[in-house]
Image (spheres, rainbow, N blue to C red):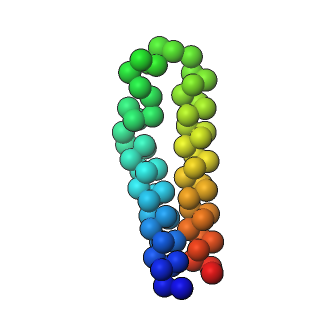
C-alpha cells in the first residue's frame, strides 16, 4: 500500500517537472530542423506530450486513491 502512494506521488511530481521543463525550455519541443517547417508537426507533438502528462498524473491520482 505504501509503495503505491510513493509511486503515485512520483508520477504526479514527474509530470509537473516535465511540464515546467517544457514551459521554460521550448527548444526541447521543436528540433532545429523544424523551425520553418509546417506547424502541424509541432502541434501534434505538443498534443501527444499533453496527453502523456495528463495520463501520468491521472495514474498517480488513481494510485493515491487506492
Quarter of the image that includes the N terminus: bottom right
Residue 39 placement (x, y as % from top left): 57, 21
Give the residue drawn at x 50%, y 64%: 12
Front residue (pair 8, 50) = 8
Give the residue drawn at x 52%, y 71%: 8
Asked if residue 32 lies left or right of residue 36, the reply is left
Front residue (pair 8, 16) = 8
Residue 30 placement (x, y as % from top left): 44, 28
Give the residue drawn at x 38%, y 32%: 27
Hey, which quadrant is residue 61 in on the image? bottom right
Hey, which quadrant is residue 55 in on the image? bottom right
Front residue (pair 1, 20) = 1
Circle count: 0
Hey, which quadrant is residue 49 in on the image? top right
Residue 9 placement (x, y as % from top left): 47, 71
- The extreme bottom residue here reads 1
Instruction: In the rendered view, tell whether residue 39 sits above or below residue 54.
Output: above
Instruction: In the rendered view, tell whether residue 10 sits above or below residue 14.
Output: below
Instruction: In the rendered view, tell whether residue 52 sits above or below residue 42.
Output: below
Quarter of the image that includes the C terminus: bottom right
Front residue (pair 48, 19) = 48
Amino acid at each position: 500500500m505504501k509503495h503505491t502512494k510513493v509511486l503515485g506521488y512520483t508520477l504526479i511530481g514527474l509530470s509537473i517537472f516535465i511540464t515546467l521543463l517544457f514551459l521554460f525550455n521550448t527548444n526541447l519541443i521543436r528540433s532545429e530542423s523544424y523551425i520553418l517547417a509546417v506547424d502541424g508537426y509541432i502541434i501534434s507533438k505538443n498534443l501527444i506530450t499533453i496527453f502523456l502528462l495528463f495520463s501520468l498524473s491521472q495514474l498517480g491520482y488513481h494510485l493515491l486513491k487506492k
